[in-house]
Every structure is written in C-alpha cells, then in structure tokens.
Amino acid sequence: MKHWGGWALGACLFISATTVACSVRVREGPLFKMGAVSSAEPPPPPEVAEPPPPEPVASAAPAPQQPEDPSDVHIVGDHLTIDHKIHFATDSDVILEDSNEILDHIATALNNHTELTTVHVIGHTDATGSRVHNMSLSKRRAAAVVAALTKRGVKQKLDAKGVGDTQKVCKDDTPECHEKNRRVEFVVEKAPTAEGGEGGGEPATKTPAAPESKKEGS
C-alpha cells in the first residue's frame, strides 16, 4: 500500500481484531525522518521579568504653622500693642496682680514671633508729679515690666526706658486724660531681612502704644 504519493511504503500485520502492528518506512527529506513525525511543541518564550513597582514618592512635610497670638496682643509694624492696661500701685513701680494675665499674653506673643530680636519697653506717666520724679518713676515701671517678661521666658533682648510725661497723648488736665497718659509702650525690632535691611529700628517713642496705668496718681 502506497501513501503520500509513493513516498512511503507500509505493511501491516493484523494480529488480532483489535491490535494492528505497522512498520512504516519514510523517505528522508527536509521535512521527514525515519519514524513518526515529531509532535513536540516548540519551547515557550523566555519569561520577561516584570519591572519592580515604582518607589513611593515622599510627600513634602507641611510647613509649620505660626502659633496663634493671644487676641488682646497685636504686632503692628514696629509696635506691640495691647488691649488692656498694665496697672501699678499708686506712685510705685509695683505691678498689680490684675495685670498678670496681660503680661502672660505679651510673653506668649513675643515667643511666637521669633523674627523679633529686640523689645524696647518705654514707660510714660501723667503730669501730676515733678518732672524729675516722673522720669524716675517711668523708668522704674518700664524696668519692672522687663523683669516680669524675663521671668515669663521671653527670649528677645529687652531694655527699659522712661520718658516721664514728655510724650503725652492727651493734654487736658482731667482724670481721664491723666489715665490715658499713664502707659507702657513696646517698640520691637526685627531680624535683618533677606535683602539685608533691618526689620526694625530705634524706638519710635512718639508713637503712642496701648496704655499702661496705675490705679491712682502718677
């Protein structure tokens, strides 16, 4: 029996009704060899390693927020102003206890503003005493405020100056006017800016700040 157009000659012997033994002689050629045609599948393509996942990008840390200042203390230009007076005993440099809270708030605000380098504390009196007495009293009161702020941990350079009644904000000879003239003024200086300029300067003592008073008298 001929197969594949004369290329193979096969002889089969029937051994049983269910078994067949065959011998096939295959002519060698470019596509055939002696024996059966190989049915092996081609090797699989080499596995390609998956690229590693990208490294997580670290997010920038948020900028620290400026602590909130007490609501009764304000940094305005080269001045620190307060909404409540610093009270002293009559004709004395002793600070009364009712001023402890505002002193605490001043210290908190100054410690929040690290750009401030120097604070000039300037004492003012009314005109009811002599000029010499008022100059001395105003200087001692300013020094008492400096001591109180230093005790509360203020880091800026603090200095005290007294100007007596030479820089009045009210010139009437009335109790209300005297009350306005009794005050403590805070002039602040800032660190040099990136452009090399100064953020502050010499005390602008003619600019009125929040008042300081005592209960009675000068």
Image (cartoon, grey):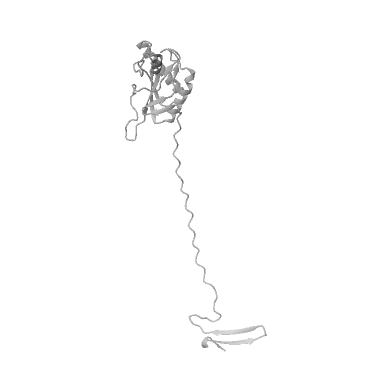
Closest to the observer, 24 or 41: 41
Residue at x-position 49% and y-position 19%: 98
Rendered location of residue 8, percent (x, y): 54, 86
Q: Where's the C terminus, which quadrant?
A: top left
Residue displayed at 48% across by 23% down: 101
Of 127 and 156, nearer the camera is: 127
In the image, residue 176 lies at what x, y percent?
40, 16
The image shows residue 112, relative to residue 170, as above or below, that is below
* Place of residue 164 in the rendered image (x, y in percent of width and height, measured from the top left): 36, 15
Quarter occupied by residue 140: top left
Which image quadrant for residue 123? top left
- Quadrant of residue 171 in the image? top left
Name the image quarter holding the N terminus. Answer: bottom right
Q: How many marks?
A: 0
In this view, 78 is above or below 4: above
**In front: 114, or 52?**
114
